[in-house]
Amino acid sequence: MKTLPFSLLTAFLLMPVLPGHAAGPALPSAETTLSLLEPVEAGACEWRKFEPISAASQVLARLPAGCQGGSTALSQDGKRGAVRFWRGAVSMPVVGKPTFPEPFPSQAFRDRLFLVDLATGTAEELPLPPAGELIEYGFDAKGRLLGLSLQGLPTEEVSNSRVVELDGAGKARGVGGGKKPLRALAFLFQEGKWTQLEMKASSEILGTAALEHRKELGERSIRALDPRFEPRDIEDDAVLDQLYELSPEQPEGQWVEFKSGSHSLAVWGTPFGNDMLATGLVRRLERGKVVALPSYAYQANDMMSLRARGPYLLISLSDSGGHPRMYRGNKRVWSSETARAVTFWPK
């Protein structure tokens, strides 16, 4: 973290604080406020509301688990949250070796889900849904916790199944061979147990998007850390000439524009079906010039999440939300090598 000298700010963030209370000054209502998970000691992880410019930090809950594989979800009224630790929530490179390799989860790692009361900071560990592997979770508009899982089909069902997935226009179409058929299930956690709400045929590509209940999920870090983005064509030949010199041999892709508010970035995007994924090869576009971001370590083999709010740009590894960097214009205003699941706090 670079807002204060690293050693001082680390010590500040690790000060003991009570859940639900601010460490230092009260958090301002700022467009830079973040949600993040921070490791505090062996086997413990804090979910924090953090404002990087002032370094104000509020501990929402302390959880008896390491932060690896962590993700978060928030109810619409801000009264409840959920934190999940999953072996699969790691950042994978597009090709080759990642710039920031993660240790492989140990045999002792357990998939765990916690429900958090954000007013008191108390956390209750929940059982996982009874069928399939939990892939996504979150709160619907009524504040109910939903869990979406995927399950492999029995052998006898695989040969007779006809998977349906969505094409780029959002229309259903049949899927032929070569795509493993799965079953997607939606569950509601209520009165201490999971109740099944929905079951649909799916595939490895479609995943939980086969479920209607997925549309009901609210704010969650898994969604915010998705590497997919809406690309725009770059039509300025002078800009393309500058970018051509930076083009990597791998991964396969092309230079496209990421545009959000006042932010305009040239991104080496790599295709994924009908979507485009953001890689770590990024440049600012300023009046026909291509400008490198300062103190920027990501490479073309990294898969990234790009998010903007007002004048601020938040870049982190996709999926895990690790190694975040926040920029304002050409200035890096904050970074961390320890925080995970870093997203903008919902307005």
Image (cartoon, helix red, strand yellow):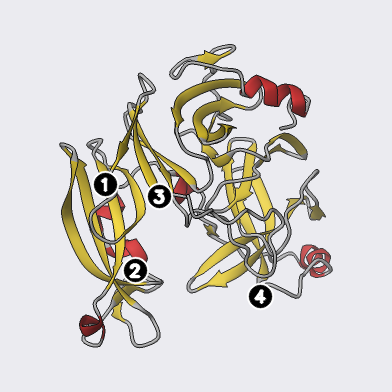
Tell me the mark number nearer the camera, choosing from 4 and 2: 4
Residue tagged 1: 146
Give the mark nearest the N terminus, 1 or 3: 3
Percent of width and height locating residue 194: 19, 47
Give the mark nearest the N terminus, 3 or 4: 3
Residue sitting at 69 percent across and 69 percent down? 96
Residue sitting at 74 percent across and 37 percent down? 332
Residue 208 image-quadrant placement:
bottom left
User: How far is the residue under mark 1 from the one under mark 4?
Assistant: 37 Å
Query: Is any atom of residue 135 visible in this view?
Result: yes
**Residue 170's disc number:** 2
Residue tagged 3: 111
| Up-down relation of residue 72 to residue 286 (above or below) | above
Residue tagged 4: 252
Q: At label 1, which amino acid type do we have? A: Leu
| Up-down relation of residue 184 to residue 312 (above or below) | below
Give the mark nearest the N terminus, 4 or 2: 2
Q: At label 2, which amino acid type do we have? A: Gly
Residue 261 image-quadrant placement:
top right
Query: Is any atom of residue 54 visible in this view?
Result: no
User: How far is the residue under mark 4 from the one under mark 2?
Assistant: 25 Å
Q: Residue furthest top?
A: 25
Mark 1, other Cα within 10 Å: few <14 / some 14–19 / many ≥20: many
